[in-house]
C-alpha cells in the first residue's frame, strides 16, 4: 500500500478488539524454539515482525504447526553444525534478540535484514557478543553481522543506554547455555521491556536471580521439559493510537487489554488522564471518552514508542505540552524526532526539541486544507498522522502508508470503522 486517503471524522465511536502484542509474541516465539516440550502460542497475530520471527525459528530447524491464530511448536532447534543465516526482515527486535542465539552455536551465524533495518545500529549486540568471546564482522556497526567462534566468557557487562533488545536476547538464551551467566547492565533503559522478558522466563519456569535491572545471574543447562500453553495479551502500543482517537473525537471501547500489563506503553493512560480524557475499566476492557484537552507533561524515556501518539495528543491540547526522552528517538524506524517536526509543521503545529525534551505548541491545527503526510516508512508515524483526520474539514493523505504492516496490518480498517 503506497498511500491511503482518510476523510474527515467528526464523531469517533466504536468497539475494537486490540491486536496481540508483537513484543510478547516475538519473545515467546524465540523461547518456544528453545523448549524441549510442546509450546502452544495462542492469539499470535499476523504482523510482519511476528512473521519474521516465525521464519527465523523455521530456519533454525524448529518444527511447528500453524492453526488459525495459534502456533504449535513441536520440535525445538536442531543443531546441524552447518553455517546459519538468519533473515530478520525489518524487525529491529529480531536482529538484536536472535543475534544472541549465536551464543548457542560454534559455527558461523549471519544476521541480516532489509529496509530501514540496514541503517540501524547494532553496536550494543556487537560489543556484547565480543565480550562473550565471539568474533563479529559488521557493516560499520550495522547488519549484516557475521558471528563466529565459541562462547568462552559468561560474565559480561552490557550497555543498555540505547536499547534493551540485545539484553532481552541474552536473558532468553542464557538458561540454555552450558554454564551460569552473569550480566551487569550499564544505564538500563526500556525497563518495562526487560520486565516483559523476565515475566516470560517465570512463565516458562526458568530460574534466575536479579538485583534491580543492573545485575542478573542465570543458571545454565536448564530445560523447559513440560508443555506450555501461552496466550499473547493485547498490544498497548497499538491500543495507544485508538485511545488517543477516542480522547480527540468521541468514545471507543477496546477489548482484550491487560489492565496491569508490564508493557511500558500502558503509560498512555497516564497521559490521557492528564489530557483530561475519561477512563473507565471493565475487567480487561477499556473505555476512553473525550472530555477536556489540557496541555500535559510526561516522561516517555522508558516508552519511546509512545512519542508519535503522545505528540498528536499534544497537538490537539490548548497550549504547550512537553514530552521528555526525545534522545531515545534517534534509532527507530525513522528519526522520529525530526519526522514529527517535519510532518506536524504541515498543519501549523510547532515542535521544538531541546535538552532531551520535545515541546509541542498545540491548539493551532490548520484543518481546512488537504494535507499530504509522509510516514518516513515508520509504522508508528503512519498511524499517528492518520489521527489528524479527526476534526478536519478536508481529507489527509498518508504516503508510504503500508508501513503499518510491521505491527498493525488492520489499523486503517479498524480506524475507519470508528
Image (cartoon, rainbow, N blue to C red):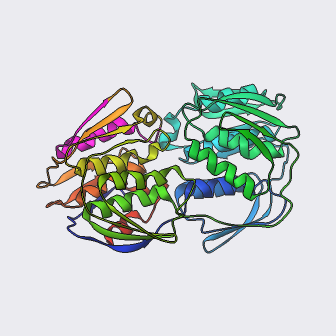
Question: Looking at the picture, how far across and down is residue 203, in whole percent?
Answer: 73, 58
Residue at 47 percent of width and 67 percent of height: 18
Residue at 48 percent of width and 51 percent of height: 265
Residue span colored magenta: 332-353
Find out whether residue 195 is within the magenta segment: no
Q: Quadrant of the N terminus?
A: bottom left
Q: How many marks?
A: 0
Q: Is residue 339 visible?
A: yes
Q: Is residue 53 above or below residue 344?
A: below
Residue at 39 percent of width and 30 percent of height: 356
Q: Name the quadrant containing residue 57.
A: bottom right
Q: Is residue 46 above or below residue 199?
A: below
Comparing 165 with 194, the one in front is 194
Question: Looking at the picture, how far across and down is residue 365, in whole percent?
Answer: 17, 49
Question: Looking at the picture, how far across and down is residue 360, in whole percent?
Answer: 26, 40
Comparing 180 with 411, the one in front is 180
Q: Is residue 399 visible?
A: no
Question: Looking at the picture, how far across and down is residue 64, in whole percent?
Answer: 74, 65
Q: Is residue 31 above or below residue 179?
A: below
Amino acid at each position: 500500500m503506497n498511500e491511503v486517503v482518510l476523510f474527515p471524522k467528526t464523531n469517533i465511536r466504536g468497539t475494537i478488539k486490540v491486536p496481540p502484542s508483537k513484543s510478547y509474541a516475538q519473545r515467546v516465539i524465540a523461547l518456544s524454539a528453545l523448549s524441549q516440550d510442546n509450546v502452544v502460542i495462542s492469539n499470535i497475530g499476523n504482523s510482519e515482525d511476528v512473521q519474521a520471527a516465525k521464519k527465523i525459528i523455521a530456519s533454525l530447524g524448529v518444527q511447528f504447526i500453524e492453526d488459525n491464530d495459534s502456533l504449535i511448536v513441536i520440535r525445538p532447534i536442531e543443531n546441524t553444525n552447518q553455517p546459519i543465516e538468519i533473515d530478520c526482515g525489518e524487525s529491529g527486535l529480531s536482529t538484536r534478540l536472535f543475534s544472541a542465539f549465536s551464543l548457542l552455536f560454534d559455527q558461523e551465524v549471519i544476521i541480516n535484514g532489509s529496509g530501514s533495518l540496514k541503517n540501524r545500529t547494532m553496536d550494543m549486540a556487537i560489543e556484547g557478543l565480543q565480550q562473550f568471546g565471539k568474533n563479529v564482522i559488521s557493516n560499520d556497526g550495522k547488519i549484516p553481522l557475521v558471528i563466529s567462534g565459541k562462547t568462552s566468557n559468561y560474565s559480561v557487562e552490557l550497555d543498555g543506554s540505547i536499547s534493551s533488545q540485545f539484553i532481552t536476547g541474552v536473558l532468553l538464551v542464557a538458561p540454555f547455555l552450558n554454564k551460569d551467566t552473569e550480566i551487569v547492565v550499564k544505564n538500563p533503559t526500556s525497563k518495562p521491556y526487560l520486565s516483559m522478558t523476565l515475566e516470560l522466563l517465570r512463565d516458562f519456569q526458568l530460574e534466575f536471580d536479579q538485583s534491580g535491572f543492573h545485575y542478573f545471574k542465570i543458571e545454565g543447562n536448564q530445560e523447559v521439559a513440560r508443555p506450555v500453553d501461552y496466550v499473547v495479551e493485547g498490544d498497548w502500543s497499538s491500543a495507544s493510537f485508538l485511545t488517543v482517537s477516542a480522547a480527540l473525537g468521541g468514545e471507543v471501547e477496546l477489548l482484550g487489554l491487560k489492565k496491569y500489563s508490564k508493557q511500558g506503553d500502558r503509560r498512555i493512560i497516564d497521559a490521557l488522564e492528564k489530557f483530561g480524557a475519561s477512563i473507565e475499566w471493565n475487567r480487561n476492557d477499556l473505555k476512553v471518552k473525550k472530555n477536556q484537552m489540557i496541555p500535559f507533561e510526561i516522561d516517555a524515556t522508558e516508552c519511546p514508542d509512545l512519542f508519535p501518539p503522545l505528540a498528536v495528543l499534544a497537538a490537539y491540547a490548548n497550549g504547550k505540552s512537553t514530552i521528555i526522552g526525545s534522545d531515545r528517538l534517534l534509532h527507530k524506524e525513522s528519526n522520529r524526532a525530526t519526522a514529527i517536526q517535519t510532518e506536524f509543521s504541515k498543519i501549523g503545529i510547532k515542535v521544538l526539541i531541546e535538552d532531551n525534551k520535545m515541546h509541542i505548541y498545540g491548539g493551532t491545527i490548520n484543518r481546512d486544507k488537504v494535507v499530504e503526510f509522509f510516514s518516513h516508512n515508520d509504522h508508528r508515524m503512519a498511524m499517528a498522522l492518520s489521527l489528524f483526520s479527526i476534526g478536519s474539514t478536508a481529507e489527509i493523505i498518508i504516503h508510504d502508508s503500508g508501513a503499518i504492516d510491521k505491527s498493525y496490518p488492520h489499523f486503517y480498517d479498524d480506524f475507519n470503522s470508528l
